[in-house]
Image (cartoon, helix red, strand yellow):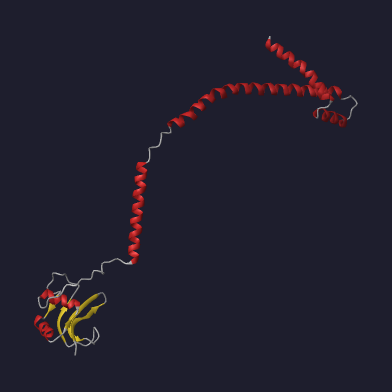
Amino acid sequence: MATAIRLARGGSKKRPYYKIVVADSRSPRDGRFIERIGSYNPLLAKDNPERIKLDTDRAKHWLSVGAQPSDRVARFLDAAGVQERAARNNPNKAVPGEKAKERAEEKAQKLADAEEAAAAAAAAPAPEPEAVEEAAPAEEAAAEAPAAEEAAPEAAESDATGSVKSEDTAEAVAEAVADDVPADATAEDATAIAEEVSEGGPVAEEAATEEAPAEEAGEEAAKA
């Protein structure tokens, strides 16, 4: 019968407690065992002597008759000086997987791109100051300001002159309509004459002709 020295779990959920037992290798982990030779409590500190309890004499006996310890029990036996445990070497265990390699390559590529961008930005010539460009519009605005100030009085004078002319024209047209309307004319005839004046008929032309000499006389008086 092949025997093994291994751990059998006890305790409650999230509070494990192990027994070091000698059992048939075909038996389940927490099943029947031949002999109990120690205990292991992982909840205790590593420097606590109660963490691992092991009967070294019975362990040596079972080792002498061919019992095979599990990896964890072999560590305990090595620490107790009962049996030396050969060091294991698995160089492929620390090798990252394919996904980890891809992530590492992407990270390295991003770092390289960032360094290249920083180097290119440092090597690029410094931009020229924009003060000269900003000064040019300011000078243009300063040059346009006096011209706008000079144009403002002229526009005001032209508006005033136009308003005076329009008032004079309106008065002349009204006088012309009053002169042309007969005394026995009806309201309909007066309306027709007013429409003819507004459309620029003969009455309006006469009013404009009368207004022109008045304007010329006013201009001569202003020059004098």
Q: Is residue 58 above or below residue 139?
A: below
Q: Residue at x 72, y 21 (%)?
A: 165
- Quadrant housing residue 21: bottom left
Direction from residue 63 to residue 131 in the image, left or right: right
Number of dots carrying numbers: 0
Direction from residue 128 to residue 204 in the image, left or right: right
- Quadrant housing residue 58: bottom left
Q: Is residue 103 above or below residue 216?
A: below
The percent coordinates of residue 147 (x first, y second) are 56, 23
Q: Nearer the viewer, residue 159 or 189?
A: 159
Q: Nearer the viewer, residue 203 or 189?
A: 203
Image quarter where the C terminus lies is: top right
Image quarter where the N terminus lies is: bottom left
Q: Residue at x 36, y 54 (%)?
A: 110
The percent coordinates of residue 34 (x first, y second) are 17, 88
Q: Is residue 144 above or below residue 125?
A: above
Direction from residue 54 to residue 224 in the image, left or right: right
Direction from residue 94 to residue 20 in the image, left or right: left
The percent coordinates of residue 122 (x first, y second) are 34, 42
Q: Is residue 148 above or below residue 7?
A: above
Q: Is residue 132 visible?
A: yes
Q: Is residue 177 visible?
A: no
The percent coordinates of residue 84 (x first, y second) are 12, 76
Q: Residue at x 51, y 27 (%)?
A: 140
- Quadrant housing residue 153: top right
Q: Residue at x 33, y 49 (%)?
A: 115
